[in-house]
Amino acid sequence: MNAPLGDPPRSLTGLHVVDADGAKVGTVQQVYRDDATNDPEWITVRTGLFGMRETFIPLAGVRRTGDELHVPHDKETIKAAPRIDADGHLDPSEEAELYRHYGMARPGSPRPGEASDPGGESGTGGMPNPGSGGTSNPGSGGTSDPGGTSGTGGSPLG
């Protein structure tokens, strides 16, 4: 998973999210961590008419520029994401549904043609987890891979 570098995840809250085409999508509401690795994995963004809906967006491939978080997905893809309540827990099946929607493999899942994990999935869903750490340097405009994560689920950071 790629995540913005440098800032604690809590500092991502309130940033303006910009899509792959440069259109404003909304504002970061929550940051969810993977329970197995404690790495930031998802953000929620307030979207929809009057900003009444929170939509999950993966942190993979994002970059930060000033007070903007640029995501590699277009606004329509984001708005069409599965409706999942951002109420404190993202369970593994919900996360799998989101990864499918965004056309991404879950971190730690086998690539096409690779053997699957005979021990099953590792990691579990999560709960809100305020705290810091685990992100990359937002001032660089780039992303880094904090290491192959293999957990599922996630938790918002306060």
Image (spheres, rainbow, N blue to C red):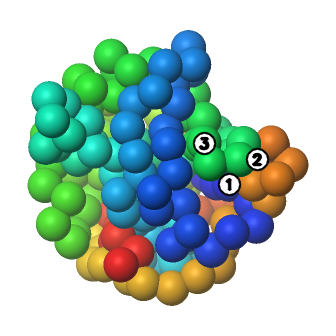
Of the numbered discs 3 and 2, the one sitting upstream in the chain is 3
Is residue 111 depicted above or below 94 in this figure?
A: above
Residue bearing the label numbered 1: 4
Of marks 3 and 2, the one in the foreground = 3
Which residue is depicted at the point 52% across and 51% down?
15
Q: CA distance from mark 2 to mark 1?
A: 6 Å
The image quadrant that residue 68 belongs to is: top right
Q: Nearer the viewer, residue 55 or 123?
A: 55
Disc 2 vs disc 1: Cβ atoms closer than 8 Å? yes
Of the residues shown, which amino acid type is indicated by label 2?
Thr
In percent of width and height, residue 103 lies at: 43, 26
Q: CA distance from mark 3 to mark 2?
A: 14 Å
Relative horizontal placement of residue 146, taking residue 153 as reference (left or right) = right
Of marks 3 and 1, the one in the foreground = 3
Is residue 116 depicted above or below 133 in this figure?
A: above
Residue bearing the label numbered 3: 68
* Secondary structure beneath label 2: loop
Q: CA distance from mark 3 to mark 1?
A: 11 Å
Disc 3 vs disc 2: Cβ atoms closer than 8 Å? no
Q: Tag on residue 143?
A: 2
Q: Tag on residue 60?
A: none
In percent of width and height, residue 137 lies at: 79, 59
Can residue 152 be seen here? The reply is no
Is residue 43 depicted above or below 40 in this figure?
A: above
Of the numbered discs 3 and 1, the one sitting upstream in the chain is 1
